[in-house]
Image (cartoon, rainbow, N blue to C red):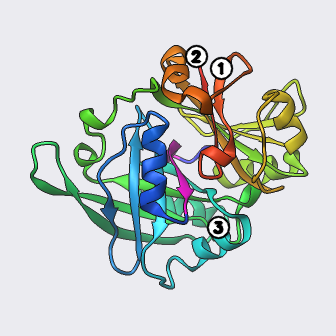
């Protein structure tokens, strides 16, 4: 039985060391980046969002060390920058938390928080969320998962922020490297009640639900064979490796310029140029 109150991937969280520098880097890669947000004090973090439809990316940085962001800081210290968490969309976080509790995963939360948002007309509103996490010890492929209920979608999915010079439209896959992909995929499969799918090259996919992006678990060697000519320098042996993004590939090639590497019928930003995250732009 799939979870009723949790649907597919909502957003990918890319943990960065210097939040403002990371935002400038992503602007150079052709993304439209939101104004900087500052989270509630107990979280001690700030972010920039890169909005697609129906999902998005989040660049997350620690502004003040707190108990809440200790796991994120530890991950940054161990693995460097890159995909640190993946959020699912929660229809109802309170009910979703009870669903995972019934499956043997004591939830962290639900937790309410918000951040101020400057809208395109200059007015200030707020983006409000209610989230819950699976236990932090349950991190398939070394990446934590949580679910996010958007209480104010209109202050997050802002039309002006959803058009990108690189033609990015939506997430297609979250790439996770691990020495034992099948084991990690089975772990996630249990956590979200979704069946695994074996791929031709030995990678194992886990659909996240609905029409949202898939998780794909594979070894670094398999990842290298999928994207020949792309340097994987800087990726951990086990952890979030990259995002496959549906895009206008011609626009992506133009926006990326010398940074982009033509590979696997698309254009790819190596991890070293994407704050520890490989970005593969592909046709739908």
Residue contact at pointers 3 and 1, CB within 8 angstroms: no
Residue 101 against residue 34 in the figure, above or below: below
Residue stretch in magenta: 4-16
The residue beneath circle 3 is 105
Residue drawn at the location 56% of the way across and 17% of the way down:
284
Q: Circle 3 — which element?
A: loop
Sequence-wise, the earlier of marks 2 and 1 is 1
Residue drawn at the location 43% of the way across and 55% of the way down:
148
| Residue 249, picture quadrant | top right
Residue drawn at the location 55% of the way across and 70% of the way down:
107
In front of the other: 119 or 134? 119
In front of the other: 54 or 50? 50
Number of the label disc, if any, that sits on residue 13: none
Residue 150 point in image, percent of width and height: 33, 52
Residue drawn at the location 40% of the way across and 59% of the way down:
47
Q: Circle 2 — which element?
A: loop
The residue beneath circle 2 is 283
Q: Residues within 10 Å of mark 2 (few under 14, many from 20)?
A: some
The residue beneath circle 1 is 266
Q: CA distance from mark 2 to mark 1?
A: 7 Å
In front of the other: 137 or 122? 122
Q: Is 114 one of the magenta-colored residues?
A: no
| Residue 37, picture quadrant | bottom left
């Amino acid at each position: 039985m799939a979870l009723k109150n949790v649907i597919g991937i909502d957003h990918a969280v890319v943990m960065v060391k210097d939040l403002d520098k990371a935002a400038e880097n992503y602007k150079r890669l052709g993304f439209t980046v939101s104004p900087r947000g500052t989270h509630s004090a107990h979280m001690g973090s700030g972010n920039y969002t890169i909005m697609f439809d129906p999902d998005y990316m989040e660049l997350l940085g620690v502004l003040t060390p707190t108990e809440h962001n200790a796991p994120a800081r530890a991950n940054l210290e161990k693995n460097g920058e890159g995909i640190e968490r993946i959020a699912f969309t929660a229809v109802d976080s309170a009910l979703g938390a009870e669903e995972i509790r019934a499956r043997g995963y004591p939830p962290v939360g639900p937790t309410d928080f918000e951040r101020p948002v400057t809208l395109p007309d200059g007015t200030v509103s707020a983006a409000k969320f209610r989230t819950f996490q699976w236990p932090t010890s349950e991190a398939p492929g070394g990446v934590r998962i949580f679910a996010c209920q958007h209480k104010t979608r209109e202050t997050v999915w802002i039309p002006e922020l959803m058009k990108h010079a690189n033609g990015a439209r939506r997430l297609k896959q979250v790439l996770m490297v691990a020495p034992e992909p099948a084991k990690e995929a089975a772990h996630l499969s249990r956590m979200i009640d979704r069946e695994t799918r074996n791929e031709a090259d030995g990678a194992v996919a886990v659909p996240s639900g609905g029409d949202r992006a898939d998780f794909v678990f594979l070894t670094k060697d398999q990842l290298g064979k999928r994207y020949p000519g792309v340097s994987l320098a800087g990726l951990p042996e086990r952890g979030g490796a990259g995002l496959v993004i549906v895009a206008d590939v011609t626009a992506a090639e133009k926006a990326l310029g010398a940074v982009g590497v033509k590979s696997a019928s698309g254009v790819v930003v190596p991890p070293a140029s994407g704050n520890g995250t490989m970005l593969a732009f592909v046709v739908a």
